Image: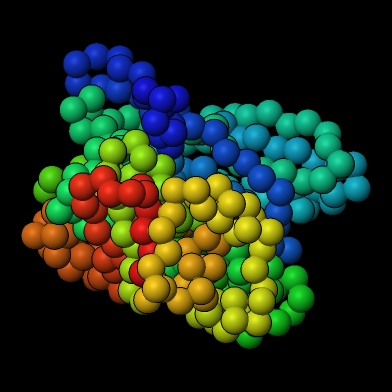
Amino acid sequence: MGFDTSDDACVYKITDDVAAIHTVDFFTPIVDDPYQFGQIAAANALSDVYAMGGEPKLAMNLLCVPNCLPKEDIRAILEGGHAKAVEAGCVIAGGHTIQDNEPKYGLCVTGFVHPDRILKNVGAQPGDVLVLTKPLGSGVLTTAIKADLISPAARDAVYAHMATLNKKAGNAVRSAKNVHACTDVTGFGLLGHSYEMASGSGVTIRLHGATLPLMDEARDMAEMGIIPAGAYRNMDYVKPHLKVLPTAQQIFLDLAADPQTSGGLLVALPREDAEPLLRELQTFAPWSAIVGEVSELRATALEFD
């Protein structure tokens, strides 16, 4: 499992009651503070296990460091990652470090799930709605931060969103009824990950731009044209499979294409089951929202209004 439908991780069945989920992710710093970088990179790596319905239990550090990086910064990166692993109930048992021209950090993670409760990024059914558990805009905002264009409050908020584990959201999704598909929204943006869900499920997903939850100042920055290059690549990826309806606003389309770091879970389930899930999510993630709906396959796998 994991190759044929672009799943978030690979799964290996160990017994009738236990399957192991394996995933790996690492990247270069997107923030200046090394501790925050470690937190965000770890939260991002751990997210794939939550997206597949599991709980992370074991991890290995992956660290690339240049000779010029101070030892205290290396320690801070590892401490940030360790803090998130502890929060997740996951043990970092070791890892591997190499010399490189720029810092990179992440985790190789193993989690566990009952084989009958694995969540996949395919299986969405006509009549389902899509629930998103984190707001969008981290790509736009981290690009704006480099130019010192956003307020300190918005900067701190985007850092907090990226460092937030999907643990609570994952627990809520596992407790929900009739979850048909689930993934986490990361580098391909909401558009790209929705397309993968739609194409793998053989359905059409319509996303509603006006209902997208957005991080503070993300819309302002996007309206100024602060759009990362990854958003344009994501748009090129989905464009052959996307119908943009006349009611759509370009600003929301841009933000739907925005590549996310440690983004939220995207969940497909019937509307009657989505409502109690939303009530649970909004007790700790008030921005959670229904952002789309699933129908029988039409001319394109993806629509945007």
Any part of residue 36 in sight: no
36 relative to 150, above or below:
above
Q: Position of residue 293 (x, y in %)?
A: 24, 59
Going 54% across and 68% down the picture, which residue do you hit?
A: 254
Q: Position of residue 41 (x, y in %)?
A: 59, 49
Camera-side residue: 14 or 205? 205
Q: Quadrant of residue 221?
A: bottom right
Q: Is 193 left or right of 103, judged from the image as shown?
A: left
Instruction: Determine the residue located farthest toward the front in the rendered image.
Output: 299
Instruction: Determine the residue located farthest toward the right in the rendered image.
Output: 68
Instruction: Determine the residue located farthest toward the left in the rendered image.
Output: 272
Q: Is 84 left or right of 114, judged from the image as shown?
A: right
183 relative to 252, above or below:
above
State which quarter of the image contains the C terminus: bottom left
Going 19% across and 16% down the picture, which residue do you hit?
A: 16
Camera-side residue: 243 or 103? 243
Q: Position of residue 235 (x, y in %)?
A: 56, 56
Q: Is 176 left or right of 227, judged from the image as shown?
A: left
Any part of residue 20 in sight: yes
Instruction: Determine the residue located farthest toward the top in the rendered image.
Output: 15
Q: Quadrant of residue 22?
A: top left
Q: Position of residue 269 (x, y in %)?
A: 18, 51
Going 78% across and 53% down the picture, which residue do you hit?
A: 72
State which quarter of the image contains the N terminus: top left
Camera-side residue: 240 or 254? 240
Going 47% across and 72% down the picture, which residue do you hit?
A: 252
Q: How is the image coloured?
A: rainbow
